[in-house]
Image (cartoon, rainbow, N blue to C red):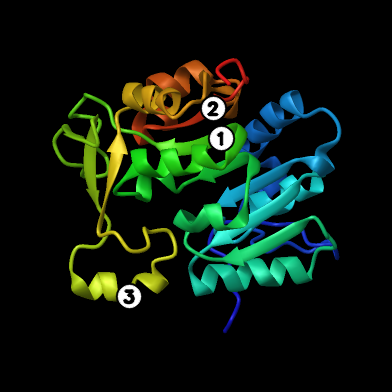
Amino acid sequence: MSISFTAHNIRLDDGTFTKPTEVPMDQHPWFVSARHILQTIYPTDREKIRIADLGCLEGGYSVEFARMGFDVVGIEVRDNNFAACSFVKSKTKLPNLKFEKNDAWNLPSYGKFDVVFCCGLLYHMDMPKQFLEMISSVTSRMIILQTHFATTDDKRNKFDLSPLCEHEGLRGRWYTEFADDAFYNAREEARWASWDNRRSFWIQREFLLQAIRNVNFDVVLEQFDWLGEESARNMLDGYYHTDTRGTFIGIKTGANT
C-alpha cells in the first residue's frame, strides 16, 4: 500500500516532513491549544500519564503528545490512515508511542486512560452522547474535544445540516456522511468521513457543554486560545463563526468520587 498524507505535516527524525504544504503539527493551533492545557494539568511526570488519540488519522497529534513525554495510544480504523501512522512510527524513535488499528468505539479494550484527545471525530458519530459516555467510562481525568457543533441559526449552515431537532435527548442537526450505497461501500477511501454510520449528529454547542458535564466531567469549559490573537474577529465572522468548530474541555476533579 502506498503511503500518503492528506493533512498531518509531521516532522520525522531525519528532519523531513510528511506534508510540507501544511503547517507543521507542532505549530498547528489545535495542537498548540492542547499542549497548553496538558502542560497546565501535567507539568511533570508525564511518562506516567496515558493519552488516547481517537481517530488519529495520520498520527500527527499522537507523535507530538509522545514528544511531550506522555504514554500515547493512537487509534485509527482506516487502512490508508493506519499505513501512514505505521510509517510515522517507523521514522520516529518514540517508545512511548503506539498505534492500534481499530474502531474508536473499542477504546475500552485498551484499558484506562488519564486523557482522551478527540479531534475531528465526535461530529462523525450518530450516537455522540453514547460515545461521550464510553469515553468517560475509561477516562480518569480529562477529555479534549476539537469538534464541529450545531447552532440555532439556520443561516449558519455551511455544511447542509438538517433542521434543528432532538436526538439522544440533545438538540442538534443531522449531517449526511454517505449519500448512497456507492459512497458508503467506498468509505475506506473517504479518509475524513465516518466509518460505519451513514449520517452523524452535530450537537448544539450549549447541549454539547451540558453533555460533557452529564458524563461526569465536573469542570467544563471551552478553550479559545487556538483562535489566535484575533479571537474576537474569529468568533464574530471568521473560522469559528463560519465553520462552527471549537475546542471543549472536560476535567474530573475527583470532587464527586
Q: CA distance from mark 3 to mark 1?
A: 30 Å
- Give coordinates of residue 54: x percent, y percent: 54, 51
The three-letter code of the residue at mark 3 reads Ala
- Give coordinates of residue 194: x percent, y percent: 36, 58
Tell me the residue at 35%/26% (across/down): 205
Residue 122 vs residue 192, the one in the foreground: 122
Tell me the residue at 40%/25% (across/down): 214
Q: CA distance from mark 1 to mark 2?
A: 5 Å
Q: Which residue is mark 3?
A: 186
Mark earlier in primary sequence (2, 3): 3
Residue neighbourhood size for the residue with mark 2, other residues' Cα within 10 Å, grouped as few (<14), some (14–19), many (≥20): many
Tell me the residue at 67%/48% (across/down): 25
Question: Is residue 55 in sight in this rendering?
Answer: no
Nearer mark to the viewer, of 2 and 3: 2
Query: Is there CB contact under 8 Å for labels 1 and 2?
Result: yes
Residue 254 vs residue 71, the one in the foreground: 254
**Residue 191 sits above or below residue 141 on the image:** below
Quadrant into which the N terminus falls: bottom right
* Left or right position of 85 against 44: left
Mark earlier in primary sequence (3, 1): 1
Q: Which residue is mark 2?
A: 249
Q: In the orientation shown, which residue stands out farthest toward the front?
A: 257
Quarter of the image for residue 32 reads top right
The three-letter code of the residue at mark 1 reads Ile
**Residue 209 sits above or below residue 138 on the image:** above
Residue 57 vs residue 16, the one in the foreground: 57
Quarter of the image for residue 223 reads top right
Secondary structure at badge 2 equals strand
Mark earlier in primary sequence (1, 2): 1
Q: Which residue is mark 1?
A: 144
